[in-house]
Image: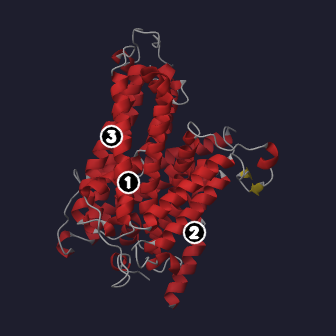
Amino acid sequence: MQHDSSASSTTQSTTRTLIPTLGLFTTVAIVAGSVIGSGIFRKPSLMAAQLGQPELLLLVWVLAGVLTLFGALTNAEVAGIISATGGQYVFFQKMYGNFVAFMYGWAALVVIQSGSIASVVYVFAEYAQYFVALPRYSPDLEHAVVLHLPFIGDILPLHDIGVKGVAITVIWLLTAVNYVGVRFGGLVQGTFTTLKLAAILLLMGAAFSFAGGSAAHFTSHFTATSTSATPTALPLAADANIVLLLVAALAGAFWTYDGWNNITYVAGEVKRPNHTIPRALMLAMGLVISVYVGINLAYLYVLPVPQMAGSKLVAADVATLVMGSGGGAFVAAAVMISTFGTSNGTILVCARVYYAMANDKLFFPSVGTIHPRFHTPNTALILQAVWASVLVLSGTFDMLTNMLIFIIWIFYALGAFGVFILRRTMPDDQLATPRPYKVWGYPIVPAVFVLFATCYVLITLYNDVTAYIAGRSALINSVLGLALVLSGVPLYLYFRNRSAQS
C-alpha cells in the first residue's frame, strides 16, 4: 500500500508539526559541517601510501569532489520538487515505492548514520586525551565482559572505557541540543562549521608560509630543497593494478566527502526548501571541494608524498613543523571542533528519516511523535542516540564504516537513476510549480554519476571478495553490510502487513 509521504511525513496535526526555521546560511553550514569531519586530518596519509604520487593524490581528491558534486547536483533537482522531511527516504518512496525507501531508512539506522555518528564522536574522544587524562582500562576490567558475535568475533565493551564514556556523553549532549529545537541545533551547527573552516584556513596559511616547504613537492620527481624533501617518490602506482588502487584511495576520499545529502532530511524545517536546498547543496559542495584540495596542497607543500605516506597523523605532523610545539595542540583542538560539528549535523538531520518512516506506518508508531513544546522528533532522536551509544560500546563502528561507503553508494546510484524516473513520472506539467532547479548537464551528469557509482560498488565488492579469498581479510565487509541491510526485510513485511490491516 503506497502512502503520500510528502503529506504524511511533514504534518501530524495542527498543533504538532515540524516548523520551517532554517535559512540559507544554516543549510549551507549543515551540508559543509556534516561533510568536513575528521577524515581530512587523517585520510591523506593513507591515500598517499596507496597512490605513491602527488599528482594521483590530488587527482583522486578532485575526482572524488567532482563526482560528489555530480551527485549533489542530481540530488538537488529531486530536493527541489520533493521538499518533505525525510530526505532520501521520501525520494526513494516516490521513485521506487515503499520497499526500497524502507531499506534505505533501515540501512541509515543500523549502518550508515548511526555508525557514522559513533565513529566521529569516538575520534572526538580520542583527541580529547590530548588535553584531559581519561581513565584507562586494566586487563581484568577489559575482559570482565566479553561478547562473542558470529562473523565479528569477540566484543569488549569495557575496552578504552574512558574514551567510550566521553564519546557517549557527546552523543547524548548533542541529542539534547537538538531535542530542544532545530533552531538551537542549527545555531550550534553554524558556529562549529565556521570555527572548523577558520582552523583549516589557519593551518593552510601557516603551511604555505613555511620556509622549508616547496611547490616542487607537487610533482613526482622533484629536487630536494630542504631537509624535509626526498628526491624520489614512492614506486609508481601504475606498476600495480592502478584501477584497484584508485578505487581503494577513492573509498577514503568518499568517506571524507560523505554527508552532503544530510540537508534533505530536514527539508520540512527549511524556509523555501525548493529553492534553498539546491542552492545550499551547490554552495556547500563548492566550498568543501576548495577546502579539501587546498589543505592537501598545503600538506604536500610541507611534506613530500613519501613522508606523508609515513605519517600517522599528517595534519599534526604538518602543524608541528610549521607552528612548533603548539602545533599538536592546535590540530587536536581543530579535530575536536570539526568532529563535534559533524556529529551535531548528523544527529540533527538523520533522526528525521526514522520519523518519516513511522509516519508512513513503516516503523514503530512512537518514533513518529513530535514534542509538543519543542516541535522536534524526540523519540526518533532518542532511538538514534541509544543505537549509536551501543555501537560505541561494542567498538564495531570501524567495521561499520568500512561497510558504510559501500552501502551508501548503492543508494546514491539508485537516487541518481531516480532522476530519470521522476522526469517521466513527475513531469513539469504535472507539478504545482515547474522544477525550480534542473540538474546541469542532464542527462550526461546524472548518467556519469550512475555509471561510476555502479562500477565503484562492483569493484569494491570484487576487492573485498578477493581479499577474503587470499586471506588478507577475515571478513567480506561489503557482503556483511548487505546482510545487515537485508535483515530489515522481515521487519518491512511486518510493518507492511500491519499497515494493511489498520
Q: Residues within 10 Å of mark 2 (few under 14, many from 20)?
A: some
Residue at image x 53%, y 57%?
171
On screen, 173 above or below 215? below
Quickly name the residue at label 1: 189
Colouring used for the render: secondary structure
Amino acid at pointer 1: Gln
Q: Quadrant of the N terminus?
A: bottom left
Q: Residues within 10 Å of mark 1 (few under 14, many from 20)?
A: many
Quickly name the residue at label 3: 289
Of the numbered discs 2 and 3, the one sitting upstream in the chain is 3
Residue 282 relative to residue 187: left or right:
left
Residue at image x 34%, y 34%?
201
Could you tell me residue 43's position as x and y percent?
49, 36
- Judge by depth and name the residue closer to the eye, 278 or 238: 278
Residue at image x 43%, y 23%?
323
The label number, if any, that marks residue 488 in the structure image: 2
